[in-house]
Image (spheres, rainbow, N blue to C red):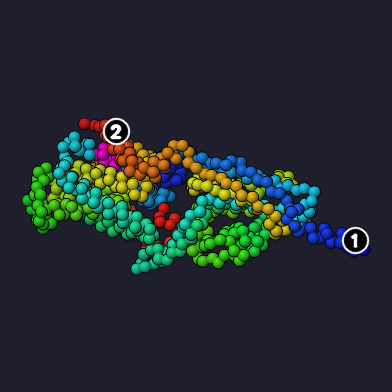
Amino acid sequence: MDLYLPIAEMPMNVFLLLGMGAAVGFLSGMFGVGGGFLLTPLLIFSGISPAVAVASVSSQIVANSASGVLAYLRKKTVDLKLGLYLTLSGIIGSAIGVWVYGALRGIGQLDVVIALCYVAFLGTIGMLMSVEAVRAIIAKQRGTPLPVRRPGQHSWIAGLPLRVRFHRSRLYISALPIIALGASIGFLGALLGIGGGFIMVPALIYLLRVPTTIVIGTTLLQTLGTMAFTTFMQSATNQTVDVILGLALMVGGVIGAQFGARVGQSLRGETLRLLLGLLVLAVGLRFAVDLVATPEEFYSISRMGGG
Amino acid sequence: MIIRSLLLVVPLILAPWPSSAETLTTALSTERVSIESNFTGSGVVIFGTVERDQQTVARGAPYEIVVTLTGPLRSMVARRKERVAGIWINRTSSELPRVPSFLAIATTAPMADVAGNRVRARQGLGFDMLPTRGLPDALPPVRTEFDGAFFRLMQTEGLFSLNEGSVEFLSPQLFRAPIALPSNVPIGWYTANVYLFSGGVLLAKTTQDFSILKGGFEQAITNLAHQQPALYGLATVVVACFTGWLAGVAFRRD
């Protein structure tokens, strides 16, 4: 059964859309990430223009993170103050991202920048995650605990000026790295159509030493705020959000996430991190191959001023 | 004697005059295609008759019909990838101002047999004669590598098509030309042109308008997205938050 997408101006199979939403939702429920970094490339590979894909996925991420934030708010594992700092800086980054997106589209270099960013970020994060998970698995098998840093041991990053106290996270750290982190993730989110959870979670844990219990809920809050703003901005400036496409992805996504969460709880943390790391790495590699391999078609056509 | 020779000359003078040529009458099977939520492509049929009267001269060659369905004109840009520092990026580009977003050509016979290059160049008829910069000229347009890529890619996407021999004569005068509209057909105003040729000479031409528009619901969404973008964005965010909340409530396990 095909469904005509009014903004994308093309029909697409409903079950394919629901299936893609569900598959990505399953993975996001399992790993606790938004899954935008998988969904946006999937939509682009199935023929939807990158402009519409990036913008519409942001609405799906809003739905996904909204249901997540509610669950974590009930468990009271969200640092609202830290979330607010991250969201506000994320919105600034997102505004710049939407603008850069339009400018790159105008000069025809959007695709290559998106691909390069995917390779750089997914490659780095995927590599770090996999290595870390493998070391944890090996350490566990040998029975030697990994050296753990205690709270109170801060890196130089936290000691920068403009210190702010975050009671919920038991942190007294500089606001500058928080703002920088929020803004860069908001920027990447708008440019690449990703929530950025897979960058935010390790950054909060390893760089800012936010307690692990607080990290996911706070990240989801930041994702919700930033992506809601991105959806609004993409609609208002580029007019590329397809609400029908977004809705089909949302419905598939929220259902898939429930099953993914159940599977995720039955897997061990290290195994889960290794799988996620390898998945992230695989998507990055796919983009790298496309960039380096000699294309079958050297030419491309598009409407002037994007599209 | 003089009168007699004049009488012999008269038909020879009259023969090539268009006043005695055929009249072409055409009609479209529909004047408006509406795109609903279940749209997966459609079609339009162009009917026509070649009318003759007593003064119409007998033609040595058969009638040939060329039908073109042209979509809204758009400014396009063609880009070429080149390898820079190991990766392939868009380096050179060329603008194609005001080219059709859709072009279906249907004929009764191979294009080259219907009319010569000069006649087709004047009309901008055929992929090889369609001007990509400016108006049709007496000479065939000069093609760059970017123009070639444009025509090739538009055909790959199914937006440009050439069906030689798909126009059929149902009777010596009546013909029909079915034209398929693919699922990715652009929205907007179309022009259907019908050309009547005989022996490589253009005898008559008709032009008709035709529109492809979105259906009620699809159009309402598009209108909202383009005319009230802020409201549309806000509504999308609310829908997304509501869906998320609904899922959270529906699948709540604690």
Q: Residue A96: horizontal and vertical position, in percent?
A: 27, 54
Instruction: Tell me if mark 1 has few (under 14), some (14-19) or many (20+) residues whose alpha carbon lies within 10 angstroms of its own.
Output: few
Residue A63 lies in the magenta-colored region: yes
Report whether A131 appears left or right of A306.
left
Q: Residue B81: horizontal and vertical position, in percent?
A: 42, 64
Foreground residue, A22 or A94? A94
Report whether A77 appears left or right of B92.
left
Amino acid identity at mark 2: Leu
Q: Earlier in the sequence, mark 2 or mark 1?
A: 1
Q: Is residue A50 above or below residue A262?
A: below
Amino acid identity at mark 1: Arg
Q: Which residue is mark 1?
A: B4
Residue A172 lies in the magenta-colored region: no
Closer to the observer: label 2 or label 1? 1
Q: Residue A255: horizontal and vertical position, in percent?
A: 32, 36
Residue B246's disc number: 2
